[in-house]
Image (tube, rainbow, N blue to C red):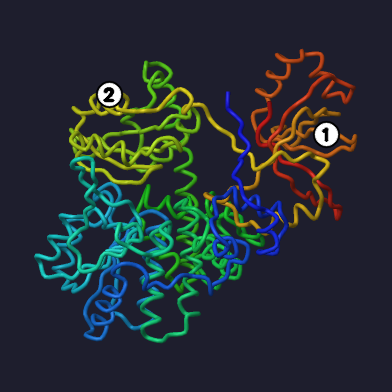
Amino acid sequence: MEKWFVKNIKADLDLLSKQIGVNKLLCKLMVNRKLKGLNQMDSFINPSLDKLHNPFLMADMDLGVKIILNSINNNEKIRISGDYDQDGNSAILTLYNGLSKINANVDYVIPHRIKDGYGINERIVREAKEDNVDLIITCDNGIAAFEPIKLAKELGIKVIVTDHHDLSYIEANGEKKYLLPEADAVINPKRWDCKYPFDELCGAGVAFKLIQGIYMEKNIDMEEAYKLLEFVAMGTVCDVVDLIDENRIIVKEGLERINNTTNIGLKALIKATGLENKTINTYSLGFILGPCINASGRLDNAEIAVELFLTKDYNKAEIYANKLHSLNEERKHMTENGFNKVVDKIQRSNIKEDHVLVVYEPSVHESIAGIIAGRVKDRYYRPTFVLTKSKDENKIKGSGRSIEEYNMFEEVTKTKDLLLAFGGHPMAAGLSLSIDNLEDFRKRLNEESRLTKDDLVPKVYMDMHLPLDYISFSLVEDLKLLEPYGKGNPRPLFGEKNIKIKKAFLLGNNQNVLKLILFTKSGRTIDGIYFGDIDEFERRISNKFGIEELDKLYKGVENKIQLDIVYTPNINEYMGKRSLQVYIQNYR
């Protein structure tokens, strides 16, 4: 079972409310999202482009801008080396479009997920030399590419790294010494010596700051840079970075542009995924459009996704969009099969006793190991690694997904003597190792883990206790000021105890939605909608109150059932009528 907590971060809400000009409830919600100071809160409630930070506050930005402008002036050949996921695609599109606008001689290359693996590599560097490339700009990768970048420099190629991943380090005498590749400029807000005020940008966000810096230096109208924000917003949502500070501004502005896009590739993808004439929001980006773009890098070639957004040909755009949609449907099917196999393997072995799950399943396609790891992590609430075979017989590779209580990058770093390659951040990691080291890897992670039993209990954090009687149309409208929601800015969650229920219904074609008519403490009623496991709900109610009470609930007869709920208030609009309802996220 999960544990429920009410966030209780102290603040002078009366003072904040006066200073920011919004009600105390919104101030409480911002404090709960760990926003510090009036500037951050003002930027959150009123996200606008004039609140973006000066790109030149970022370490090496001035160097990078100068190198690129010199290259353009000398008509040197520039190559962008990107990554095959959504953020990598967005970063490539940001740099490519941004540099093309100022007549740079620029092209791009994307490593193949299976043949090359992640990031810039020796093949990409040697091909750049053969093609007489003068400058390589990495995006969404490069911070740990020590050898390929060293090779590029030896071959006389200039290199600018733009990245947002955590830095590699070596530990000596309990102190971390951070390492940078030998590039001409390394632009990454996570650098220990970087004074930039916000370090949670995605790869596309860092690429955008570079274009912003170049345009400032050349006195180009900043609106030209802002046109790139529809791509940057996609990368920001799909790379699941915190939607606060600049990320919030980027996504809010980017969504407005996406909903009015003139990009024929994006329009074609919106149509192919059934989103035409619907408002595109963070959910549409993260769970419908983003996975289609990612599917090209997973199962085919990531260049299809980039070409989709670059093409000026309507027919090509339609072909590419339909291809991405069908690849994603195939990916979903493969994920479901792989997930079932991994769960079966855990259930039939002693792995399930481990605090850190390490599962080797050779039938899993390596491109979806991370997605499966994420689903397994959600099921067991354990840090999870899913590993599969590599093209090299003795090598296995895969991805991990973590829980809040476990810094995956740091823990994997402790086992680097067993690994061939690794990278990542606190919540996710990618790695490869010899199959001979698999058991040692599993054993070491578990032996060195400081996770307690309490850490491994799922936790639900409510913003506050809010009686159902307090819900109003104006409250729901006020909450819209917090949109768009995402990581770092979750949908507000409220809690209420001892709720009596008038009646239950099953809704939907598959009878897979539960509607509960809830009594407020004053005796009014409000609809509660639950999208979770209805069989489990019925089993738990029957165990606690008896099958007869469950039967009464469905018949709408007075019953003894009471629930505590965690919920989000919402307005239901149907046939021109508006009514208040709550989405029930958790119950007990």
- Looking at the image, can residue 136 be seen? yes
Label 1 Cα neighbours within 10 Å, binned few <14 / some 14-19 / many ≥20: many
Q: Position of residue 200 (x, y in %)?
A: 43, 56
Q: Nearer the viewer, mark 1 or mark 2?
A: 2
Q: Position of residue 529 (x, y in %)?
A: 74, 38
Identify the residue shown where x is 44% and y is 25%: 343
Label 2 Cα neighbours within 10 Å, binned few <14 / some 14-19 / many ≥20: some
Real-space CA distance between mark 1 and mark 2, rounded to the nearest whole angstrom: 50 Å
Q: Position of residue 138 (x, y in %)?
A: 28, 63
Question: In the image, is 419 to the left or to the right of 222?
Answer: left
Amino acid type at image mark 2: Lys
Identify the residue shown where x is 81% and y is 17%: 549
Q: Give the tally of numbered discs.
A: 2
Q: Which residue lies under the disc numbered 2?
A: 443
- Looking at the image, can residue 510 be seen? no
Q: Nearer the viewer, residue 15 or 540?
A: 15
Which label number is shown at residue 517?
1
Q: Nearer the viewer, residue 241 or 461?
A: 461
Question: In the image, is 213 to the left or to the right of 504?
Answer: left
Indicate the quadrant containing the C terminus: top left, top right, bottom left or bottom right.
Answer: top right
Q: Along the polypeptide, which appears first: circle 1 or circle 2?
A: 2
Question: In the image, is 260 to the left or to the right of 446?
Answer: right
Image vertical order of residue 464 relative to residue 45, above or below: above
Image vertical order of residue 165 relative to residue 69, above or below: above
Secondary element type, mark 1: strand
